[in-house]
Amino acid sequence: MNQEIKQPYPQSYNDIDKATIESGFTMASDALTCSLLKTLAVSKPGGKFLELGTGTGLSTSWILDGMDASSSLISIDNDARFLAIAAQFLGGDDRLELVCIDGADWFEQNEHLKFDYIFADTWHGKYLLLDEAIAMLNPGGLYIIDDMLPQPNWPGGHHEKAIKLVEDLEKRTDLVLTKQCWATGIVIAVKKQV
């Protein structure tokens, strides 16, 4: 199957991509993953969205592109330099709240919040504090992670961490899970009604 993206890229994508390359940031989500993030965002009208790991905002721009006017997105990152790129090109969108904070601190301060869609693209909410992230999902909520297939920028030993994460997700009884060997390796889970 052709893995070419047919839907239009977000208006701000090229500017963010250029600034990302100039900044030296090398962990941005690929365009195939971003296209899926947009498609899934459309399924949550009026939704509460959470992105863990803004980076420079490439994936953020796609999520926003799929959200309707009554949805909201909180996107967090702990690197102010890269978050500034997202703020420069996306900060005018009233649906978006960009937060510069350590992931563990954010979880501690916001454990009461609930979301319909979580894209976990950093350690916190994925390899760390997974239970806390899943607890924030509303029934029917989407939990999405990428980079589950080996990546060239992975440090030594990371492959084993990725395998264990998928195994941990598969053992959960509160999620319905699909693993995709597509793009960078995507896992999509939906929170079951208890």
Image (spheres, rainbow, N blue to C red):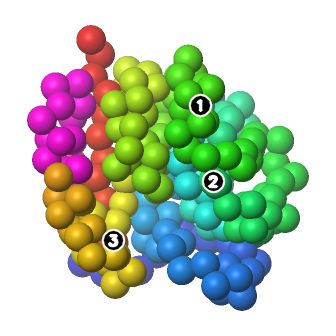
In the image, is residue 170 part of the stretch drawn in magenta? yes
Residue designated by label 1: 48
Q: Which residues are magenta?
A: 165-177
The mark closer to the camera, 2 or 3, is 2
Q: Residue at x 70, y 82 (%)?
A: 23
* 149 or 156, nearer to the observer: 156
Q: Where 34 falls versus 142 (above or below)?
A: below
Q: Is residue 80 visible?
A: yes
As helix, strand or loop, the secondary structure at mark 1 comes to strand
> Which residue carries the number 3 mark?
184
Residue 109 sits in quarter: top right
Whole-angstrom CA distance, mark 2 to mark 3, is: 21 Å
Q: Which residue extends farthest top?
A: 194
Rendered residue at 24%/60% (across/down): 162
Lower sequence index among marks 1 and 3: 1
Q: Circle 3: is it few (<14), some (14-19), or many (20+) Cα within 10 Å?
A: some
Residue most toward the bottom? 22
- Amino acid residing under circle 1: Lys
Q: For mark 2, what is the residue?
A: 77
Q: Amino acid at mark 3?
A: Thr
Secondary structure at badge 3 equals loop
Whether label 1 touches label 3, CB < 8 Å = no
Q: How far is the residue under mark 2 from the one under mark 1? A: 18 Å
Q: Taking 76 as reference, is 84 above or below it? A: below
